[in-house]
Every structure is written in structure tokens, then in C-alpha cells.
Image (cartoon, rainbow, N blue to C red):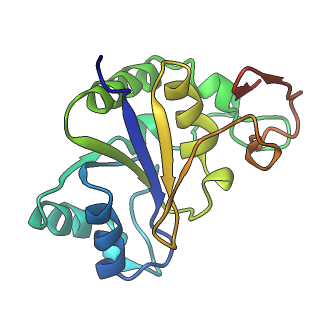
């Protein structure tokens, strides 16, 4: 029986570079997929794209940037809700999003364990959980969120504390996924 596809996520938050790298290595991550729309940080220069492109391969991890396609800050009013928040449902329908998601799914079924990275520490407040994880879970991929304490929490939509940030849209639990 084939192993269940697996995908990790992490928010770089304010971790020192050494701690962040240790978290990746601790969980056996082989590919880091950067899903930040804007891959830089004024406050944490170690997480700028250029820094990561040097730092990550130096410890044997492959770095991939897919923030343009999978980022959580869309351009265009048609991808925003009436109150100005990203409309994840519309974003998930974009051809570029679907193509990039297929790349992530391919990585998730390959031997090297992939990892989605954004800046937000709490996955429940981030598009990597509320947009990307929804889509890959629908396709049978197990999602684990690495937390700042070093543990990994499984993506589970049957627990109230893990309902998505879709306050302006009706949310009901169907199976293990909120709709």
C-alpha cells in the first residue's frame, strides 16, 4: 500500500534563521515551497527570498518560489470580498493557482517531503491553511502544520478551533472540510 501523500506547512514568524532551519531539518523537509506573495521582510531579513535562495540549499533543502501563483494577497478587485479580504474560493479557480497546486501535489506524492512556507506563525490566520491546505486535503493529501514549539499539528476541519477565516461566507462542516 502506498504511503499517504504528506505536506507540511510553516510560518517563519520571527524565528532566528538557525531555529527555522532546525525546524525544517527536524521534520525531514527536503523541499521548501515559498508561498508568500511578497517574499521579503523588513523586520526579518533572513526570510527575504534572496537570503533563502542561499541559505536553504546550503543545508540540502530545495527552495521553490510559488508565491506569485499561490500567494494570499491577490491583485484585482474581482479576487476580493466586499469588505476587502482575499476571496479564497475565487482564487482557487484561477488557472495559475491550479497549475501551481498541481506542482505542490506532485511534490507531496514524491519521496522528498515538501513544505509550504509563509510568514504568519498561526496557520489558522494564513492562506496556507485557509486556501492551499483546503485544496490539497480535498485531493487526499495529509497536511501537518509545524508550530513554533517544534511539534506538528494535523490539519483537521472537524474541530471548531480549526474552522477557516471565512466569516462573510456561510461555513458548515461536511466530512472533514469546512465549506
Q: Nearer the viewer, residue 115 or 34?
A: 115
Q: How many marks?
A: 0
Q: Nearer the viewer, residue 84 or 99?
A: 99
Q: Quadrant of residue 83?
A: top right
Q: Position of residue 163 (x, y in %)?
A: 77, 41
Q: Please identify the quadrant where the N terminus is shown.
A: top left
Above/below status of 9 relative to 99: below
Q: Position of residue 48 (x, y in %)?
A: 33, 68
Q: Please identify the quadrant where the C terminus is shown.
A: top right
73 relative position to 179: left or right = left
Q: Quadrant of residue 20?
A: bottom left
Q: Quadrant of residue 12?
A: bottom left
149 relative position to 77: left or right = left
The residue that appears at 49% across and 46% down in the rendered structure is 144
Q: Position of residue 59 (x, y in %)?
A: 13, 66
The residue that appears at 20% across and 63% down in the rendered structure is 56
Amino acid at each position: 500500500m502506498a504511503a499517504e501523500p504528506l505536506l507540511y506547512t510553516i510560518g517563519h514568524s520571527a524565528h532566528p534563521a538557525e531555529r527555522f532551519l532546525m525546524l525544517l531539518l527536524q521534520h525531514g523537509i527536503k523541499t521548501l515551497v515559498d508561498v508568500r506573495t511578497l517574499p521579503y521582510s523588513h523586520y526579518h531579513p533572513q526570510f527575504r527570498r534572496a537570503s533563502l535562495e542561499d541559505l536553504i540549499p546550503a543545508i540540502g533543502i530545495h527552495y521553490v518560489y510559488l508565491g506569485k501563483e499561490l500567494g494570499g494577497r491577490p491583485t484585482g478587485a474581482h479576487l476580493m470580498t466586499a469588505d476587502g479580504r482575499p476571496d479564497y474560493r475565487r482564487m482557487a479557480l484561477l488557472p495559475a493557482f491550479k497549475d501551481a497546486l498541481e506542482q505542490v501535489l506532485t511534490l507531496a506524492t514524491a519521496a522528498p517531503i515538501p513544505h509550504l512556507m509563509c510568514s504568519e506563525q498561526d496557520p489558522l490566520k494564513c492562506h496556507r491553511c485557509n486556501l492551499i491546505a483546503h485544496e490539497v486535503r480535498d485531493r487526499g493529501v495529509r497536511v501537518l502544520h509545524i508550530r513554533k514549539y517544534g511539534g506538528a499539528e494535523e490539519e483537521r476541519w472537524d474541530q471548531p478551533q480549526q474552522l477557516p477565516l471565512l466569516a462573510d461566507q456561510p461555513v458548515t462542516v461536511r466530512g472533514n472540510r469546512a465549506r
